[in-house]
Amino acid sequence: MGHEVTLVWRDGREATIEVANGESVIDATEREGLGVPFGCLYGACGTCTGRLIEGDLVHVERPRGLKPSHRNEGYVLLCVAEPRSDCRVEVGATVQADLVPNPWK
Amino acid sequence: MSTDEPSKTSEHHGHEHHEVEGPGYPTPAAMRTESEREKTAFVMGLRVGMDVDEPDFVGVVDVDPESETYAELIDTIEMPNKGDELHHFGWNSCSSSCHAEGLMRDHLIVPGQRSSRIHVIDASDPRDASIEKVIEPEEVFEHDLSAPHTVHCVPGGKIVISMLGNADGELPGGFLQLDQDDFSIDGHWEVDRGDMEMNYDYWYQPRHGVMLSTEWAAPETYYPGFDLDDVEAGKYGDSIHVWDWETKEHQQTLTFGEEGLIPLEIRMPHNPEETEGYVGAALSSNIIRFWEGDGGHWEWETVIDVEDREHPDWDMPVPGLVTDTLLSLDDQYLFFSNWLHGDVRMYDVSDTGNPRLVDQCWVGGNFGDRQEVAGHEVRGAPQMLQLSRDGRRLYWTTSLFSSWDNQFYPDIGEEGSLMMKADVYPEEGRMELDEDFVVDFGDAPGGPARAHEIRWPGGDCTSDVWQ
Ligand code: FES
């Protein structure tokens, strides 16, 4: 038995999927064809960044693409994250863009 | 091979001094004067970091003005997986193997910068190309390497790819060598990495037995986006490395410090006699010239300094961010892009130590007045450059790297980027934006895409090296 993860996009779209035990959230979104962005698939690039709104989501490998401050703010790397309870997660390309703003602005 | 027609084994160079037929041209002058106008362009199209549920592709753009589909994306070779971030690519063989019989310039080596997956595309017919082989990331990680970047064919039947990280996306990276026949992995190219800790681009001059490589940062550092804290922490490069091309050993490090932060693209003259070249330092926004001095010791100096500019709405002066550089095949002109400012510059480098700015083209960016071309909003600014072999047409795309695009030009992530062109008049030393040529990757089949590196079938200014 896995857990239900509800994905929330900034445009208001939502989708709920079942993430199996031992399955990463990205693997589950790919299985369901939901098009959540990803890149390296091993926790380095941050392309798959989501933000945990509710629930218990754990990183099974070190999320190197996130700084400690990002992790404190609830950002998660969905390619190396597995749910330990039902969750709500904000997803989509713009979530990653929050991590590092334009430093000159 | 003079055109981008499907390759044949029996093509003529029209050169008597050249007994063995190979895939390239015996000299840069031959490529410049004997080749026909480019008709097809291979252009990377990316979907990484976008809400477009499609893989990256190698786009085929029609650049033949005689054609009905001129300036259109006429084909896309889709990757089998999503998330690759195709970045730079190269040929299985080039002019450095010109004297090698039996080889053809017919396969594109297309690496995924984020996935570490390497694709081999059969491009013998440029308008009907297909994926022939895929090297999966796990096979690359076995050699403790990741994040493939620059692909060059090298003499001796090999292909060498600079790799920016180890298997975990951390430092130091190295060079992966592939076999030209079956595209299998040989292992590392280098035998002694010396104090090279970061990698990015490289160029070699086989006649002088030298290779030079540059530095970006660890994949885990630059992948998520550009953070000035990482610069302060010394996580970005400021050096280039000199290698012995024969023994594959690291020989010397040239450290630039503040003057040369993030040295990216490196170009040496196409004339194989030369022992000098240029590197564009992106963050310092300088062009640094390097040369071999007495006793084989390499030296350097800054020859172009792009001034930071004050932006009325931004807190800090903004560097140009020199992201791509290019030398014309006759080595007379140096072009480079200032991706944050929004211009591409043309310098006469006949006197190599004293580059002379001859022209500049502004379009897009954070400072340019011109934000629209042929009714298309310019998303991004001049970035990856490619010059026609005859030096008369400069093309560019406007996307840099998905996460960096999303920081500086978020529109690209939503609506895709563009390919544009300027007509170059080398005799007069000037260029002019072609206001009719725009390929909008926002209209790519399957959804918007980021347009990145450009290559011509038949060879170009940034892939061919002469022996
Ligand atoms: S896909 Fe790269 S960190 Fe998740």
Image: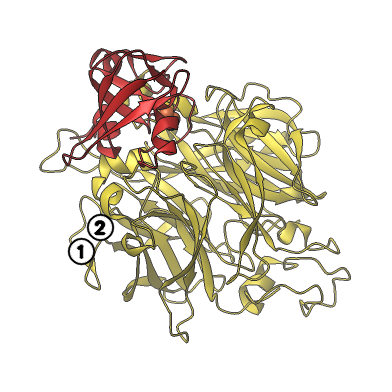
Chain colours: A red, B yellow
Residue type for callout 1: Arg
Q: In the drawing, does residue B145 fall left or right of residue A40?
A: right
The CA span between labels 1 and 2 is 6 Å
Residue B440 visible in image: yes
Quadrant location of residue B191? top right
Would you say the residues marked 1 and 2 are in contact, meaning their CB atoms lie under 8 Å apart? yes
Image quarter (top left, top right, bottom left or bottom right) of the C terminus of chain A: top left
Same subunit, labels 1 and 2: the answer reads yes
Which of disc 2 and disc 1 is earlier in sequence?
2
Q: Residue at x 53, y 54 (%)?
A: B352
Give percent across and percent down for residue A102: 24, 34
Residue furthest out toward the front: A1
Quadrant location of residue B262? top left
Give percent across and percent down for residue B127: 57, 72
Residue furthest out toward the left: B312
Q: Which residue is mark 1?
A: B370
Q: Residue at x 72, y 67 (%)?
A: B27
Image quarter (top left, top right, bottom left or bottom right) of the N terminus of chain A: top left
Tag shown at residue B364: 2
Q: Is mark 2 within 8 Å of ligand 1?
A: no
Tag shown at residue B394: none
Q: Please rate how many residues cluster around mark 2, counting C-alpha atoms within 10 Å: few if below 14, some from 14 to 19, many from 20.
A: many
| Label 2: chain letter | B
